[in-house]
Image (cartoon, helix red, strand yellow):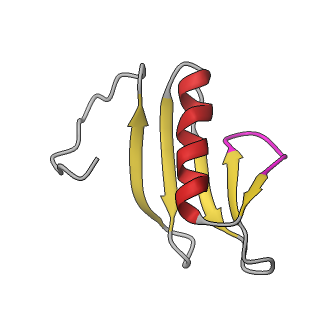
Amino acid sequence: MSNYHVSKDKETGQWRIKKEGADRVSDFANQLEAEKIAKQFSANSGGGEVRIHGLDGKIRDSDTVSPANDPHPPKDKKH
C-alpha cells in the first residue's frame, strides 16, 4: 500500500507526483493527468491515499484508492 502526493512546482509550473518516503518525482503538464496517474500508481501498489495539494501547499483533497480500506469513508459524492 502506497500513498502519493500531487502538487505544483512553483518554479517549473509542472504538476508533480511524489510517493511518500521517496526522493524521485514524476512531472506532468496538468493537474488532471497527474491525479489520474497517481491513482493508477497507488492502485498498482495495493491501494492507498492520493493527496492533492493546493498552490499554498496545504492538502485540499484526499482520495482513497482501492483496494485500500478507508476507515472513514467520505460523505461527499464528488468522487
Magenta highlight range: 19-25
- Seen in the picture, residue 17 relative to 1 is either above or below; the reply is below
Residue at 59 percent across and 55 percent down: it is: 33
Does residue 42 lie above or below 56 as drawn? above
Q: Is residue 35 magenta?
A: no
Q: Residue at x 53, y 26 (%)?
A: 43
Q: Quadrant of the N terminus?
A: top right
Question: What residue is rendered at 84% in x and 46% in y?
Answer: 24
Residue 8: quarter of image:
bottom right
Q: Where residue 46 sits in the image (x, y, percent)?
A: 54, 18
In the picture, residue 9 is in which quadrant?
bottom right
Residue 22 belongs to the span the image colors magenta? yes
Residue 24 sits above or below residue 43 on the image: below
Instruction: Specify the farthest residue to the right.
Output: 24
Q: Main secondary structure of the magenta part?
A: loop
Question: Where is residue 63 shown, x and y percent of the image?
Answer: 39, 44
Quadrant in the picture for residue 20:
top right
Q: Position of residue 69 (x, y in %)?
A: 35, 22
